[in-house]
Amino acid sequence: MKTRSPFTDLIAFFGALAIALAPYWRWLVFCLVLLIVLPLPFLVKNFFVFQLTLAMIYAIAILGLNLLTGFNGQFSLGHSAFYAIGAYTAAILMDQYGVAYYWTLPIAGIVCFGAGFLFGLPALRLEGIYLALATFALAVAMPQILKLSPIEHWTGGVQGIVIIKPNAPFGLPLNPDRWLYYFTLAVTLVLFLCAYNLVSSRTGRAMKAIRDNAIAANAMGINLSLYKSLTFGVSAFYTGVAGALGGIVVQFVAPDSFTFALSVALFVGLVVGGVGSIAGALFGAWFVLFVPNIAEHVSKGLAGAVYGIMLILLIYLMPSGLAGLVRLVVMRFAKAAR
Amino acid sequence: MHMHKYLIPALALGLAIGAAGPAAAQKKYDPGASDTEIKIGNINPYSGPASAYGTIGKTIDAYFKKINAEGGINGRKINFISYDDGYSPPKAVEQARKLVESDEVLLIFQSLGTPSNSAIQKYMNAKQVPQLFVATGATKWGDPKNFPWTMGWQPSYQSESHIYAEYILKNHPNGKIGILYQNDDYGKDYVKGLKDGLGAKAKTMIISEQPYEVADPTIDSQIINLKASGADIFFNVTTPKFAAQAIKKAAEIGWKPVHIVNQVSSSLGSVLKPAGFENAKGILSTSYGKDPTDPQWKDDAGMKKYFAFMDKYFPEGDKTNALSAYGYGVSQTMVQVLKLCGDNLTRENVMKQAANLKDLEQDLSLPGIKINTSPTDFYPIKQNQMMKFNGERWELFGPIMTGATGS
Amino acid sequence: MELFLHQVLAGIATGGIYACMALAIVMIYQAIDHLNFAQGEMAMFSTFIAWQLIQWEVPYWAAFFMTLAISFAGGYLIERLIMRPIHNAPILSHVALFIALFAVINSLAGFIWEYQIKSFPTPFGTHSLLGEGLISGHDAGMVGVTVAMLVFLFLFFRYTRIGLAMRAAAANPESARLVGIRVEWMLALGWGMAASIGAIAGMLIAPVVFLEPNMMGSILLYGFAGAVVGGLTSPGGAVVGGVLVGVIENLAGTFIPYIGRELKLSIALALIVFVLTVKPSGLFGRSVVHRV
């Protein structure tokens, strides 16, 4: 028998471990994550709790985009528009009609589902780059539409709407930041689990079949237009819920909050997290939220350039996003174990 | 054990102060202030579509370096922490919270833009942290009753408009006014101010209002509509790029109205020169400060000080940039307030001193323009003087005027 | 009626800007089969180079052609140094790379040349040609140069070996390689040409909108609109599309009561979506048939 170096042994050991635990690894990771995120708000400063909450919100929005792009092959640069619709729905309901914040989430989601479904119908005829441009148009037009004077008494026009931050219910000993963190965490968990179930369901398989080969999928009896518009709707639902949460947490909505730059940010989050990876959305959100801060820390005058260079390096390092890199590493370990 | 080391001198110091009598006030600090340092937070768009304004943040940073090099304020160095919000309100909220809760600054100074400041105003007031001398001219920043922790600095857009209304009513009572304005809070504030100032005559005098979006590449179409409307007074409420375009286009299509351009775009160097001096001749505007590109201030003492500062502390910056001059001016006010605070560096006292400025004249203020505030008056600069461009430089004319503020 | 005519004329003048940009977009789409979101920023940067040369007292035309050469080299280098290493990455990663390029170029330009607007000279003069200054010498010159570029590109792509090779390399790299075309070379060449055309567009647009790091943001948007309306595969369509967008935008802003003025841009964008749904490959574009 050939002697092997201790290093290869080590790799083989971890590889074997990974394979042995493979059936349960999702649950293991899940428990580990819970163990970290549950006590976190009590360990860090409030503003960091706020940032983490924002990161989860972006993760939901990126997940929404991912359902559309990663699992259905439709490309959108217009998700800032759905985010805006969600945020404004929540803000108007709370500000004008006194609706409780937790009710605004499903309503915002449903409104966005409708908007997404309707936008998905004409967009059905479009593919690839043309769909990207149609959604791009939507993203660019949205801030203008929000400013429109006939609807100013709802939207607050250019001034936007200020929202009051909700307090923890039932007299829980939590400050509003911590409460919103747990609230958002719960919403995030539910939505991510739903997404997992969706993509592994029959519907999810149909979605992916359309992504991989629309003509073949059609030949197999999958109703293309129904599934494509439905996916658009579900994707908008996720992003809309994220928008509503974002409005509540930031306590302010205004047209300038939802420019095309937001669409770009979500898109970048999608790519660096990994297209077609549900967990990747979390890393994408982390990137969207924190990398600009790091960039400006390096240089104020060249903040944009530093951000761009970091993005370029990241794409070189992992052309298929973090999820792609992880997949690659796991495969290497598995190979070594054999 | 270690406590004694500090306690004893501190006690001794306390006794010494006590002995010195009531004249020497007790040292009082809120987060962000200490015997050696004052932490000042700031939010500026260093990236994104409004990154031109990043110059203000950089100038302020340079100015505080100068103050520190000269010994600081009452012996304390300024630690200026400035963050980028990319002109995005949610990002501004994030950065404001970081400044207040993590960096623990004494106050936030010169946060820029109406959307960003609107987003953080409620938070700042709930936290009772001063949001001082914000970099926007919206009228809502002077509302001490509802927002006692927020204060503006420059003359409000509406008060400036009132001055134009007064001028129009006096000199062109039968004029027909056409307005080009940016379709946001800034543009709408100006339009509202003009309408308020014209009063009952607004309805008949204003015959055309043309909005444009920041995303519009050109405003040619709007200028053609204004000319076609038959307006003979042109109220130009635009940011520098669009103002230059409008001045040039109006000249190109042979439209020669009485042309009033808002203060935002009255810079000789960054608006009138690119638009062409020959096209800009006769344009009216107002000002409260000296334009660094205007030759008439070449030998002015205040201007020389400004130039010397730029050469020494911000040599990579462009000293003809109106935004640098602005940053210089507003930093002087901030320093003055901190000086007045003495050793009582609590947030409450900062607001108290900021609301207690009396006849403050600055290096770059026009002669006669003074900063005044009081607990009920949160508009530091209220005065403006009208001016006319003679083809080479601005000619100031008429009295120093105070436009009505707020409504 | 007079107002209508004036708005149409002004729309053509503004549309000329969009057409110019749309042409550059279509050009790179033909050469590399992607839409380059950083294209506007590349054009802006080239224009700044020209401006700098003129500041150094290089005569206009010399600066013009030097800028074309520098831009060509720049585009070529971007392809070789930045795009090449991730050639095999998914398309979406390419798009993210374009976004990164956008951020880098924009930020660099601001760092080097500041954000204050600068006037840029025009070789055609600003005297009025038509309709009381609505079409100036510069506007006419811009349309003229755009048409000349169009003819040049048409001939280049249809009749020259290298043009045909570039099209082949973009449309079907595998087959192109088999018939002996150096695909990598062609892609880099395409980037270089697109950068040069962008530079021309930038230098023609800057005298109208003034030169500053963010000048191309909204123009790129309208350029996309023009290119899409005309059809991404048709340079002629892009030019017609650009002018159409300019005219329709002006007319909508002027004649649709109440909301027209505020929704000028949105109406132009709704038009794109409408055109796309009726004719998914644009007015003049070929529809692409996929082989299964």
Image (cartoon, rainbow, N blue to C red):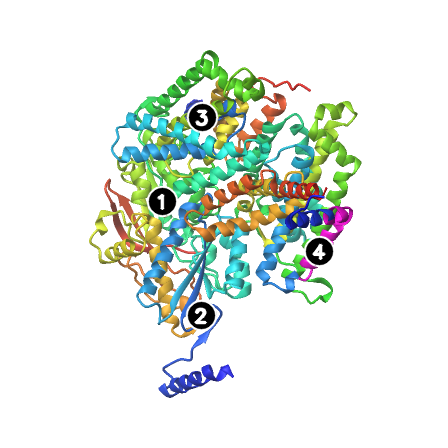
Q: Residue at x 61, y 35 (%)?
A: A76
Kindly identify the amino acid type of the residue bearing the numbered disc 1.
Ser
Kindly identify the amino acid type of the residue bearing the numbered disc 2.
Ala
- Residue extending farthest to the left is B299
Q: Which residue is mark 3?
A: C194
Q: State the image coordinates of residue B304 (x, y, percent, origin top left).
A: 23, 56
- Say whether marks 4 and 1 touch (CB < 8 Å): no
- Answer above or below: position of A127 versus A243: above
Label annotation for residue B106: none
Relative horizontal placement of residue B260, taking residue B45 as reference (left or right): left
Relative horizontal placement of residue A170, taking residue B56 as reference (left or right): right
Kindly identify the amino acid type of the residue bearing the numbered disc 3.
Ala
Residue C86 figure quarter: top right
Indicate the secondary structure of the residue bearing disc 4: helix
**Viewer-side residue, A277 vs B127:** A277
Indicate the secondary structure of the residue bearing disc 3: helix
Indicate the secondary structure of the residue bearing disc 1: helix
**Crowding near pointer 1: few (<14 within 10 Å), some, many (20+)?**
many
Kindly identify the amino acid type of the residue bearing the numbered disc 4.
Leu
Q: Which residue is mark 1?
A: B265
Say whether residue B80 is visible: yes
Say whether residue C247 is visible: no
Quadrant that contains the C terminus of chain A:
top right
- Answer above or below: position of A294 versus C22: below
- Say whether marks 2 and 3 touch (CB < 8 Å): no
Q: Which residue is mark 2?
A: B33
Q: Are marks 2 and 1 on the same chain?
A: yes
Q: Which residue is mark 4?
A: A32
Magenta-highlighted residues: A17-39
The label nearer to you, 2 versus 3, is 3
Chain assignment, label 4: A
Quadrant that contains the N terminus of chain A:
top right
